[in-house]
Amino acid sequence: MPTESDESLPLPVVLPDKPNFRHLKDEARDLVRDGTAASTSAALFLVARRYGFASWPKLKAHVDSLTEVGELKLAIDSNDLERVKAMMTQNPALHSAPLGYGKNGPLTWVAECRVPWEAPKPERLAMARWMLEHGSDVHQGGDGPLMRAALVGYRAPMMELLVEYGADVNAEWGGYFPILFAPCETVEPVAIRWLLEHGANPNCAREGRKYPVNALDYVIGTYSRSEQLAECMDVLIEAGGVGKLDNPAVMAVLRKRLDDLDGMLRVEPDLVRWRFDELEIGATGGRTLTLRGATLLHVAAEYGNVEAVKLLLERGADVNVRATIDENGVGGQTPIFHAVTQFWNYGLPVAQVLVERGADLGVRVKLPGHYERAGEVVECTALGYAGMFPGGHMGMENKCVALLRERGAVE
């Protein structure tokens, strides 16, 4: 039986017999361009629904299935080793077929263990080993297999296999992205530790590269937010990793060293009011706003450190403290702007604390907008800003938006 929300959707459009990905993506770009969708991910979701699919990945899987490469992908996704063997034996060119992330190739897709999303089972490891022994290049796509395997800690058995066949833990995927940056981006301490134990260099900064920094800088600056950030930082520091951030108080917040933070606040109570103009970290969730000119309370709100938020408020931090406003009038946000604009509702616990402690939901400021719209500046309240970003992500409820509306916030 259709729900009320189902009835409000237009009837699905019939997908062409030979659908074209470029055409479908052009449709999504048009939705962003005309303002129907706020981001590319939202537009892809709308395109999928237009053709009767629950999500973009489901639409993509259907289109893929209509080709030989798509048939190979389905065999990999179902861990059908015999089918993979048969297809690749009959057509060896499939070893380098444009498949998986960045079209790096079938081995890269096998190594990623994304469908099904699980630790590599014996049959998946056997598939990777057979492919490596019958024509697949462990370095395909600029060392794509190891880079994608390294995104999640439980894929360590796959990383072990790839290294056995010659993968280099110090390679740079595509010539610019060190393998170690993969688990730094996803904030995965197990994978970081595994790579370090197998010889990865945490101090891998190199001028001229797209990301010229060390691993510690990269994990602090990644767009992901996770309770595991402190552990990732500790693992890198214990391995001799160093970074550009030279601010003990900010580092204490990021590493959840509350005793250290409390000690600093007792020595210098005014620390709760200091603004740090040098902070270039903090962009997340499609949002280009950083922590430049922010206070420690902004930092704690951005990185979801509820206990640090409570400690700073107890030590006199103003829940409505403003960040620095630049010469163009951009900035001045309060901490709640950082809390309510996170992936997967990650900032909800901090947002709840800030609201309970008196966060002013009527504050209106000019802030950097979405990274997909370069140079965008928007004038907004916390509610208006929260509505621009993923929140629940891909159809999930944006609980921060719901919280703000429940408390009477205006856009």
Image: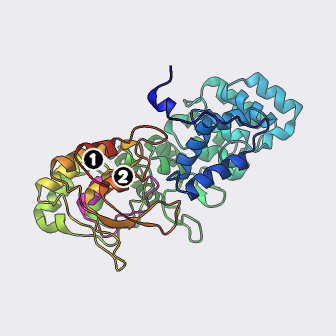
Magenta residues, dominant SS class: loop
Neighbourhood count class around disc 1 (C-alpha, 10 Å): few under 14, some 14–19, many 20 upward: many
Q: Is residue 98 left or right of residue 25?
A: right
Give the residue at x 31% y 48%: 304
Question: Which residue is the site of mark 1?
Answer: 404
Q: Position of residue 241 (x, y in %)?
A: 43, 58
Does label 1 or label 2 sit earlier along the sequence? 2
Q: Residue furthest bottom?
A: 327
Quadrant position of residue 277: bottom left
Q: Which residue is mark 2?
A: 386
* Residue 293 seen: yes
Marks 1 and 2: CB-CB under 8 Å? yes
The answer to whether 337 appears left or right of 6 in the picture is left
Residue 123 position (above or below residue 375):
above
Instruction: Give left or right: position of 94 versus 326.
Output: right
Q: Give the magenta part as a residue range.
A: 285-303
Asked whether 291 or 51 is in front, the reply is 51
Asked whether residue 168 is in view, the answer is: no
In the structure shown, which secondary structural element does the residue marked by tag 2 occupy? helix
Q: How far across and down, in percent of the image, does residue 63 sit? A: 72, 36
Residue in the foreground of this view, choosing between 127 and 31: 31
Which residue is at 55% across, 35% downward?
155
Q: Nearer the viewer, residue 53 or 222?
A: 53
| Magenta residue check for 292 | yes
Look at the picture and state if 311 lies above or below 118.
below
The answer to whether 32 appears left or right of 79 in the picture is: left
* Residue 314 sits inside the magenta stretch: no
Give the farthest residue toward the top: 1
